[in-house]
Amino acid sequence: MAAHGSGAMDTASDPPLLNIGAAAAKAGVTERALRYYQELGLVQPSAVTPGGMRRYSEEALARVARIRELQSLLGLNLEEIAVVLRSEDRAVEIRAAYYEEGVGSSERRQLLEESLALTSDLRATVEAKRAGLGEFLKDLDGRITRIQAALSGTEP
Amino acid sequence: MAAHGSGAMDTASDPPLLNIGAAAAKAGVTERALRYYQELGLVQPSAVTPGGMRRYSEEALARVARIRELQSLLGLNLEEIAVVLRSEDRAVEIRAAYYEEGVGSSERRQLLEESLALTSDLRATVEAKRAGLGEFLKDLDGRITRIQAALSGTEP
DNA sequence: TTGCTCCTCACGTCACGTGAGGTGGC
DNA sequence: TTGCTCCTCACGTCACGTGAGGTGGC
């Protein structure tokens, strides 16, 4: 199992867990945000010390990064993000349970199709947003051209 | 001056002002939002009746649309949006005062250059966001491909 | 006069920000 | 023992949402 604590006997290359300060800095969020995500069940600390201090793995930080991406790029709220994350977690589970017992083939297929539907929906949302930004860019380019024209008329 | 009120003597094709309910519906926002924008000085009603009822012109609604665009597409907050709107108002003013007295040529040039700088900044922000969405799309396409591959392995 | 729309408070919400006051490990 | 970081309340903020209670025009 290669189990060992995080004491002085640490020998090898298992990535160390970060406390909340370092984790927040690395993820580019505040400690408050990490505690809030935990409160909502979005990101659990990978470990908690007997003293109650939260520890975060790289995997947890990747989850935080995903949340920020869905927030800032798509403008999703945390409830919508929870849905996306749950679906992505499910997809990983399914993949991991590929040859496992207990998951019927038709059940597996069902879950994969759900995953595909949700991902395709997300893709459509992203594409629409990108198109909107394209229109916005065209508008801005028009404005810039007009300002430059006006400027060239003011040239000495 | 073509001045006349909005009484029963209305004759021609000047676009009518909308009350807050119709205005909100047309702009796709709530009445509360319109009142809030006014409170912040972002959008003034084009007129207010003696009874205190707000009236909105198409121009005011265009301003609201611009606010929503800057909010939803770029994620700007209302303070940042105020800066953009003020600059755009300035640009319109400058354009209108093209041959007017009272605005010196170097002052005019100065204002146009400020306007150009701000618009170019905005353009860079939009472009960055669009690039981010492009990366996101690539990632999603990868996920979709993998799910489809897994699905084809579950085919009868 | 009756509806409907408008008005102004004013408290609630979401996603945190920001101290207050206290505990814990190198 | 001294710092620094962590902890848990708990109130504040932004951009509105949502009634409460009252006025105004067809």
Image: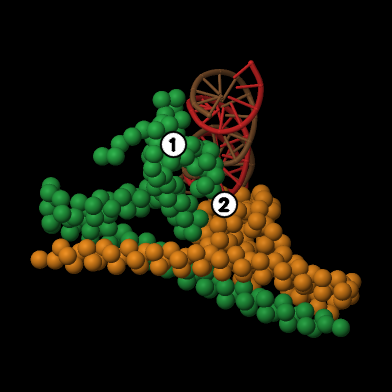
Chain colours: A orange, B green, C red, D brown
Whole-percent x, y for residue A148 in the image: 24, 66
Q: From the viewer's perspective, is A90 left or right of B22?
A: right
Q: Which residue is mark 1?
A: B55
Residue A57 image position (x, y, % from top left): 63, 65
Q: Vertical placement of A26 versus C24: above or below?
A: below
Q: Residue at x 22, y 63 (%)?
A: A150
- Classify D7 as above or below B129: above
Q: Position of residue A126 (x, y in %)?
A: 57, 67
In which quadrant of the rendered image does the N terminus of chain A lie?
bottom right
Element carrying mark 2: helix
Q: Which residue is mark 2?
A: A33
- Of A96 and A1, nearer the camera is A96
Q: In the image, is residue A43 above or below residue A107?
A: above
Picture residue at 56% right of the left edge, 69% below the top: A127
Which residue is drawn at the image coordinates 77% and 79% (left, top)? B151
- Disc 1 and disc 2 on one polypeptide chain: no
| A110 displayed left or right of D16 | right
Q: Are marks 1 and 2 in contact (CB under 8 Å)?
A: no
Task: Please give the label number shown on residue A31.
Answer: none
The answer for which chain carries disc 2 is A
Q: Quadrant of residue A44?
A: bottom right
Can see residue B67?
Answer: no
Helix, strand or loop for disc 1? strand
Q: Position of residue B127 (x, y in %)?
A: 42, 68
Q: Given this view, does label 1 or label 2 mark the residue nearer the observer?
A: 1
Question: CA–CA distance between discs 1 and 2?
Answer: 42 Å
State which quarter of the image contains the C terminus of chain A.
bottom left
Can the viewer see residue A130 in this picture? yes
Q: Amino acid at mark 1?
A: Arg
The residue lying toward the viewer, choosing from A35 and C13, is C13
